[in-house]
Image (cartoon, rainbow, N blue to C red):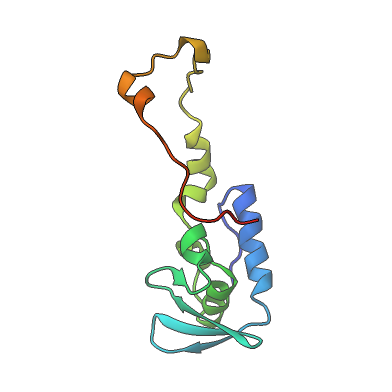
Amino acid sequence: METSTQLGEKYDKLFRENLIASEQMTVSSATEQLYTVFEGVRRNIVCLEEGTCSCGKFQMDELPCPHAWAVLKNQQLKPRQYCSFYYKKDKLLRTYEFPVNLMLDESLWVIPIEVMEDVVLPPKGRRNA
């Protein structure tokens, strides 16, 4: 299984941690793209075609979660194609390619009246303690 990536350091670390976390998982295929991954008594559903997992991490991080990793290893697929291109080193570096202009001192900001008059209320509901 190929584990070398062209990902930025932070994302490469997460990529490898997910690989290690997938070691004890077993996979059962439902269809060519839909798999059930068993992790002890827990199970998760992975869809490679849509890049989703019932744990929510695969679609949120756009990196293979441990469950997706288990499927990729089971099917002998290359994991690199399941990583967002935004995490690749060259793309991360291009983020900082253009200069960023500093904000003026807050006392010099020109704020439109309609923005100043907007009333923003906190969300309804309870706060988590």
Residue at 48 percent across and 60 percent down: it is: 60
Picture layout, residue 73 above or below residue 113: below
Quadrant of res 98? top left
Front in this rendered view, residue 74 or 36: 36
Left or right, 15 with reference to 96: right
Query: Residue furthest toward the left?
Result: 114
Q: Where is residue 11 drawn, in percent x and y?
A: 60, 53
Q: Where is residue 43 drawn, in percent x and y?
A: 56, 84
Residue at 44 percent across and 40 percent down: it is: 121
Q: Is residue 62 visible?
A: no
Quadrant assignment for the C terminus: bottom right
Residue at 51 percent across and 89 percent down: it is: 28
Front in this rendered view, residue 64 or 105: 105
Quadrant of res 19? bottom right
Q: Where is residue 8 drawn, in percent x and y?
A: 59, 48
Query: Residue furthest toward the top?
Result: 108
Q: Where is residue 99 drawn, in percent x and y?
A: 48, 22
Picture layout, residue 34 above or below residue 120: below
Front in this rendered view, residue 128 or 58: 128
Picture layout, residue 67 above or below residue 13: below
Quadrant of res 117? top left
Picture layout, residue 127 above or below residue 95: below
Q: Is residue 111 visible?
A: yes
